[in-house]
Image (spheres, rainbow, N blue to C red):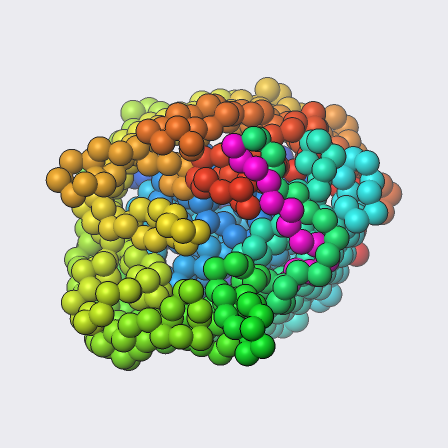
Amino acid sequence: MIAVPKRRALWLAPFLSGAVLPGVASSNTNTDELAPLVVSATRNKSVEGETPQKVTVITREQIEQQLAITNDPGQVLSNLIPSYSPSRQKLSNAGETFRGRSALFLIDGVPQTNPLRDSARDSYTIDLSMVERIEVIHGASAEHGLGATGGIINFVTKRAESGSFNQSAGVQLTSDDDFESDGLGYKANYQASGQSGQWDYLAGGTFQERGVFYGGDDERIGVAYPGEIQNSTSYDVMAKLGYWIDDNQNVEFSVNRFDLEGNGDYVPVSGDRDAGIPTTAEKGDPDGDPGYNEVTTASLSYAHGDWLGNQVDAKLYSQTFRARFATTPYFPYDDGNGNTLYDQTRNESDKLGGKFTLVRDGLFNDRLKLTTGVDVLQDETRQELVHTGRTYVPESTFRNYAAFLQGDLAITNDLTLHGGARYEYAELNVDTYQTIDRSNVTQDNVTVDGGNPDFDETLFNVGLVYNLTDWAQVYGNYSEGFGMPDVGRVLRGISDPGQDVDTLLTLQPIVTDNREIGTRFNWDRYELEISYYESDSDYGERLTEVNGVWVGNREKTEIQGVEVSGAMQVNDAHRVTLSYAHSEGESDTDGDGDVDTELTGINIAPDTFRLGWSSTWTERLTTRFQAFHYLDRNVDNDELDFDGYTLVDAAVGYRLPKGRISLGIENLTDEDYVTYYSQAARVSDDYYFKGRGRTVTLGYAVNF
């Protein structure tokens, strides 16, 4: 429970997801008594269920249900978010798209995505044990600026609990169903928090050791060159310190350090895709050093609940991102003794930024709310070859300045108009550099003249929400998203001489138009939301593989889809959820202005049914059952057709006199399958992986 002074509770309460304030019912009682939940990922402090686009809020209870089964963030997101691609079960989340495009990942509003050199690891920057809820905005959005062409996924971290000193701890043991010694893993976490006078604090840490993964055929799953979560070690340390200046003002400093590194005990055994033989792994000493993620996110926030009648939020932040990729056969060099060795790359990205928001409510006879603000961002990124010390992607500095105005007008008691505009100005600075010769990375290929291109764009959004009854609602929305192509991929791939950064058309921004209509029903024990969307970009980016290297093609792309989410509270003890997601898309590969080629699994997720059943059998005993059915998908390229599969998970929890024990089983039926990415996104013997077979997790958690 979070205890705050009464005056503070009046404006802070909506942000405390999962918190129980005095006089507010818990989540197990009538939802009419709950305070409305403000979605902090929306700059205008929108309330869940009242937005003109689909918004999903994943609660702490849902996160814990998933963590009892899997600790893979990509798997958790895929399990709970319609139109999110199936997890790759790797450190890389390349191919894990949201509505066919890129998601902007945030931690408490701080961007984790790296626009200049997409490492495809931005979902692995925090342990979900540190997260209170996950806010998901579906569809292109410019609310937080760069990157959200498919939507926004905001990890909201835990807050201090009431009382002077509260502790929680947990342990987990994970194994394949044959309990092989090299498949064993474990996790431990601890958190302490409290309040004292005007101060509140939270400190926590997790440590996890992962074994190797086994498929449904009881064979080791192959290790991926770029980086792995199997056979790895990770830790996460988070600290928060807050101070209430008075009942309306507080400041908070927050820092989170996440580190995951492979143990390097296995080497891949290449498969044969045409013969249906997957890549496996065997004991060995891989060349080079294991891949890793090292991410430090820090922020200093100030909030004022009543500054001259306005709500003010200000945040200064930094993010330091380091990602090393394992050795691949794509970076050969001579060691000077006639031996061919292979290098590996490391991404380095440093962000500094600020977000400033002012909200004025109660205007125009309490019918109008205005939100305005300014955002600034500086991102410095480079990619180097670790062993030869060569520069693979030159140091690039990206500066972004934005101002926005958003309005929410209650035209009538049942009809609300939402609209706004955001002006983006961005500049990119790159010094003159040399690309490398990929046949021998110690040699130069061509010289590229540096430059300082700049871009500006005004992005608009407008939406309507109409309450048909007190339990039925319809909405419509048009919004625009602003993104950059993978700048590093463009710069490192130049092979023709005489080019300069200022005139590279492939560096132009990606502007995505998103149109959506939908309806919501929330009647008694039943909930249903249906939405249809179209997402178009006149100058998008489609990845294709050329000689083992991903190349970005700037093409017109059009994506459409449908999402259906429903829930039924059968009785006070049983809740059933069901969702269906369908998407399809095409791109203009010949440049004639007409989209003509189906997008493959690197962009589009398969049609998916998701079923969940949560039960409270007694005060002590709870269960969770969930199933996911991925339908077959055929595209123009027969080599990337997808044979669907069905996965089933289950978990049981039992409350002890002290603490709680849980048993989770991932892939309960031990389905033997090849992952969606391996089938539908990439034609490669080395990346032809099976998915994880039956996996057992035993956990114990206690608060004290």
Is residue 267 magenta-colored?
A: yes
- Is 627 in front, or is 347? 347
Q: Residue at x 51, y 25 (%)?
A: 644
Which quadrant of the structure image shows residue 236? bottom right
Which quadrant of the structure image shows residue 603? top left
Q: Is residue 493 left or right of residue 411?
A: right
Is residue 665 magenta-colored?
A: no
Residue 518 drawn at (x, y percent): 31, 29
Residue situated furthest top in the rendering: 570
Residue 224 makes an appearance in the image: yes
Q: Is residue 72 left or right of residue 332?
A: right
Q: Which residues are magenta?
A: 261-274
Residue situated furthest left in the rendering: 592
Residue 268 drawn at (x, y percent): 64, 50
Q: Residue at x 33, y 71 (%)?
A: 445
Residue 39 drawn at (x, y percent): 42, 49
Vertically, is 318 above or below 33?
Answer: below
Residue 377 drawn at (x, y percent): 34, 70
Residue situated furthest front in the rendering: 338
Q: Residue at x 47, y 23 (%)?
A: 631
Vertically, is 448 above or below 645?
Answer: below
